[in-house]
Amino acid sequence: MYRIGYGYDIHKLAANRPFVLGGVTIPFEKGPVGHSDADVLLHAVCDALLGALALGDIGRHFPDTDVKFKDISSIALLRQCHTLILSRGYTVVNIDSTVILQAPKIAPFVEQMSQNIASVTGLQAHEVSVKATTAEGLGFVGAGDGVIAHATTLLRKK
């Protein structure tokens, strides 16, 4: 039996915040704002994993009202989501994702992002796709004030 999941996340960018994406800290003058490290890519992947099994979203599992999740690494959140998937008898087949941002350019970091996600989810890096595009200067993302990520995943019953 197979299940497909889809995840989406969006964060505004602000000065004096680290820009963490896919578990990689990228040098940039702004970073996503959030309760955790605000890793929009990993949040979308978490939501895709949870959604595939109708387990809600990361806000349900890791509420921003809980101080234990303040500034937590989203790698830790992904690890917990993956544990939930495994506990229900599923494995991850693949993950596909797209990040939409005007800047910074993330191409030099994509391979490490794929490897980070793969290492947590039991995949090989070639089974995790991380792509990027710009907003062509449109809207708040195009103005450099935000970042969006989409992710899909396929799960297989063990």
Image (spheres, helix red, strand yellow):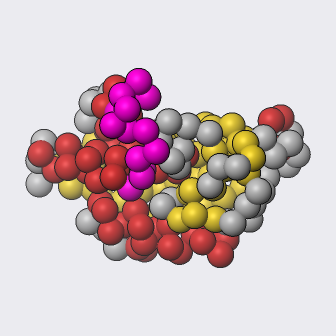
**Figure quadrant of the C terminus:** bottom left
Q: Quadrant of residue 133?
A: bottom right
Left/right placement of residue 35 relative to residue 120 reads right
- Residue drawn at point x = 47 percent, y = 68 percent: 114
- Picture layout, residue 96 above or below residue 80: below
- From the viewer's perspective, is residue 156 above or below residue 69? below
Residue 53, image x, y percentages:
26, 35
Query: Magenta stretch?
Result: 62-75
* Quarter residue 107 falls in: bottom right
Asked where in the image residue 68 lies, by quadrant, the reply is: top left
Query: At x 46% / y 44%, what residue is drawn?
Result: 71
Query: x%, y% of residue 2?
Result: 24, 46
Dominant secondary structure (helix, strand or loop) of the stretch shown in magenta: loop
Does the stretch in magenta take in 70? yes
- 157 and 131: which is toward the camera: 131
Residue 124 lies within the magenta run: no
